[in-house]
Image (spheres, helix red, strand yellow):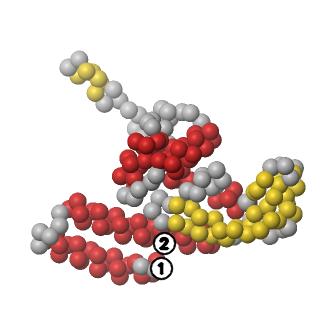
Amino acid sequence: MKSIADCAPVAREVVNCLAEELELGQSGLKEVEEKILQSVYRLGALMLEEVVEKIGEPTQENTIYVDGKRGRYRDSANLRLITRFGSEVVCRRRRYSIEGEGGYCPLDEKLGVQGCAGFTPLMSYLQALFGGSEAYAGAAPRLGAALGFSVSATAVQPNREMVGERQAFRPFDPLDGQRQREPLEVRRAAGRDTK
């Protein structure tokens, strides 16, 4: 699949092929789900790549001001981000030198990737989530198993630290978008708490 338009016919072929494999006993439902997930990841990677391609550079000026400090255009460089889909998104961005601070990229700020150590914000969050409760060496394989591709412990550590600094510590607050529709009810049954 090279474009989103190619996905619909390929999806139909995948469905027919997987149904036949399952019917003939050549694979089980687990393998079918894994193959579907691989297709979904390819589609997600294509979609994310197209979204990022459509985002324009926030400024084309040679001189900018950031927090009252002057920045001068330095050069353009590739921004490489490892995504939730196991793919890599690459886009061109303008870099500026800010007086007394070093580099600044307006596109990084627009995309929300500054301080994500080469990962998308969702990947950074997942690394912080998995790496926050145990040693990085143990968190990386668990994250890799959850995502379907490997992530190194050396990638988890700096991301966990950077995201942890920016994220408020609220371990019992539900994440946005995952709030329960109804309040949780606790009942007592046979001397034990049940939910």
Q: Where is residue 170 in the image (x, y as percent from the top left)?
A: 54, 33
Q: Mark 1 points at which residue?
A: 3
Q: Residue furthest left?
A: 24
Judged from the image, the secondary structure of the residue bearing numbered disc 1 is loop
Q: Do the residues labelled 2 and 1 touch (CB within 8 Å)?
A: yes
Residue 46: give its label: 2
Kind of residue at disc 1? Ser
Identify the mark nearer the N-term, 2 or 1: 1
Q: How far apart are marks 2 and 1 (CA)?
A: 7 Å
Q: In which quarter of the image is residue 96?
A: bottom right
From this viewpoint, is residue 18 visible? yes
Q: Which residue is drawn at 51% across and 48% down?
A: 154
Height in image: 190 above or below 195?
above
Q: Position of residue 113 (x, y in %)?
A: 63, 55
Q: Position of residue 122 (x, y in %)?
A: 52, 53
Q: In this view, does 177 lie to the left or right of 90?
A: left
Q: Nearer the viewer, residue 154 or 33?
A: 154
Kind of residue at disc 2? Leu
Residue 18: give its label: none
